[in-house]
């Protein structure tokens, strides 16, 4: 009797078993991370083998959070769970700020839709959960947005005086507006429209995270009251190194403490949109072409870094890709394990953000503020 049919049958059975196991794991992962209704308290939320038992908002205490540690637990999660060393007495301890003194700021000139709606609604939900302020700026009239009216370039124009800038530049203007208009806020975190507080850390308030950040950086908020965030290893950082810059930055996340010096840096950044194109190392017309404000952020830091703190690893030209798993980090790609997941890599990453960070409809109702 020929052994070929028997061998083929065994091989087919093995392939089917492998396929089934892969499919089962994908279904499990999808079930655990797809659509989440934050209006209901869950018993368990599983994300990559990290099990978080959620408590109600009123009784929330991060130090009593039950975290099941596994080989897939990011070190960042352990830092948030455990108390850090107390801040030196001569420094402002930002972890002691009241929740309503901390704000997330976002900006987008487009009607809320697609991935930028997912980002805004998730961050809005997160702020409501922990008692933080959520601020969202736009260049469009809210009535036009609500009525789904078309808008032209002029209606969405980002202007510095009489100079037309690319829309992304107005996120710096939004930071200035937030600083000027929300006097009760002492600590602001600006996040791009493709960035979210990571689902891994949604049960930890910004106050808890800021305690980790300040301890790890030994951050003196009165001498360096603004934080610029590093990028990770990528072609952008390779280009930056090639033209002579020593630190590679990404403008998708900016954190600042209310202070005259942080206001000064933000104003200089906005005004740098009018810098001459002559002698620009990146050799791009940054007023209307990518990398827009990130070009001038790089130039600003390398001209005068004295009042700017770098996160997450200021002793390195850029942060490590998996920094949140091995140590800690403020913001980078979702796979980095940082507190903020920045889905800037490609369209697929943005689609994943839409899938993973879907929330209750009530958090999608966002009062957008028109930049003036």
Image: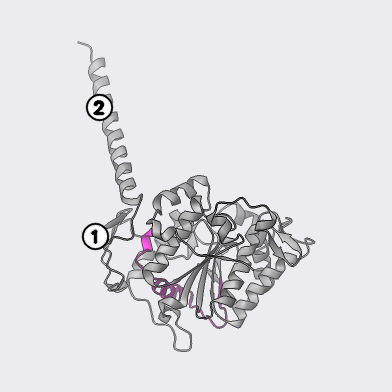
Tell me where residue 128 appears, x and y as whole percent.
Answer: 39, 68
Q: Counting other residues with Cα less than 10 Å from the Cα at mark 1, is it few (<14), some (14-19), or many (20 or more)?
A: few
Q: Which residue is denoted by mark 1 in the rendering?
A: 43
Mark 1 vs mark 2: which is more N-terminal?
A: 2
Q: Is residue 337 above or below residue 5?
A: below
Marker disc for residue 88? none
Closer to the camera in the image, 228 or 192: 192
Can residue 341 be seen by looking at this rendering? Answer: no
- Helix, strand or loop at disc 2? helix
Image quadrant occupied by the C terminus: bottom right
- Closer to the eye: label 1 or 2: 1
Residue 28 figure quarter:
top left
State the residue lying farthest toward the left. Answer: 1
**Residue under the image location 44 percent in, 48 percent down:** 352
Magenta span: 198-227
Answer whether residue 137 is magenta in the image: no
Q: Is residue 189 above or below residue 259?
A: above
Tell me where residue 136 appears, x and y as whole percent.
Answer: 53, 65
Can residue 239 be seen by looking at this rendering? Answer: yes
Closer to the camera in the image, 150 or 64: 150
Closer to the camera in the image, 173 or 93: 173
Q: Which residue is denoted by mark 2 in the rendering?
A: 13
């Amino acid at each position: 009797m020929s052994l070929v049919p028997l061998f083929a049958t065994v091989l087919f059975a093995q392939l089917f078993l492998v396929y089934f196991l892969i499919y089962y794991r994908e279904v499990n992962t999808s079930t655990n991370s797809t659509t989440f209704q934050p209006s209901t308290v869950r018993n368990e939320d599983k994300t990559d083998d990290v099990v978080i038992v959620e408590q109600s908002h009123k009784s929330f205490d991060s130090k009593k959070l039950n975290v099941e540690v596994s080989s897939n637990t990011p070190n960042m999660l352990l830092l948030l769970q455990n108390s850090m060393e107390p801040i030196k007495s001569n420094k402002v301890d930002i972890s002691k700020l009241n929740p309503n003194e901390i704000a997330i700021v976002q900006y987008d000139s487009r009607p809320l839709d697609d991935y930028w709606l997912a980002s805004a609604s998730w961050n809005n939900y997160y702020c409501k959960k922990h008692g933080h302020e959520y601020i969202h700026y736009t260049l469009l009239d809210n009535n036009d947005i609500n009525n789904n009216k078309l808008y032209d370039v002029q209606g969405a124009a980002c202007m510095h005086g009489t100079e037309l800038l690319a829309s992304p530049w107005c996120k710096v203007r939004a930071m200035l507006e937030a600083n000027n208009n929300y006097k009760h806020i002492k600590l602001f975190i600006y996040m791009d429209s493709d960035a979210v507080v990571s689902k891994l850390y949604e049960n930890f308030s910004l106050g808890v995270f800021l305690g980790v950040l300040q301890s790890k950086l030994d951050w003196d908020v009165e001498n360096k009251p603004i934080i610029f965030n590093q990028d990770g290893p990528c072609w952008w950082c390779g280009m930056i190194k090639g033209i002579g810059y020593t630190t590679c930055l990404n403008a998708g996340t900016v954190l600042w403490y209310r202070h005259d010096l942080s206001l000064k840096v933000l104003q200089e950044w906005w005004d740098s949109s009018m810098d001459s194109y002559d002698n620009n190392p990146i050799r791009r017309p940054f007023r209307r072409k990518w990398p827009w404000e990130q070009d001038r952020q790089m130039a600003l830091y390398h001209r005068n870094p004295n009042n700017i703190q770098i996160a997450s690893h200021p002793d390195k030209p850029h942060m490590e890709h998996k920094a949140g798993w091995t140590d800690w980090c403020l913001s980078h790609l979702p796979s980095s394990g940082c507190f903020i997941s920045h889905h800037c890599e490609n369209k697929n990453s943005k689609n994943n953000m839409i899938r993973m960070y879907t929330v209750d409809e009530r958090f999608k109702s966002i009062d957008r503020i028109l930049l003036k």
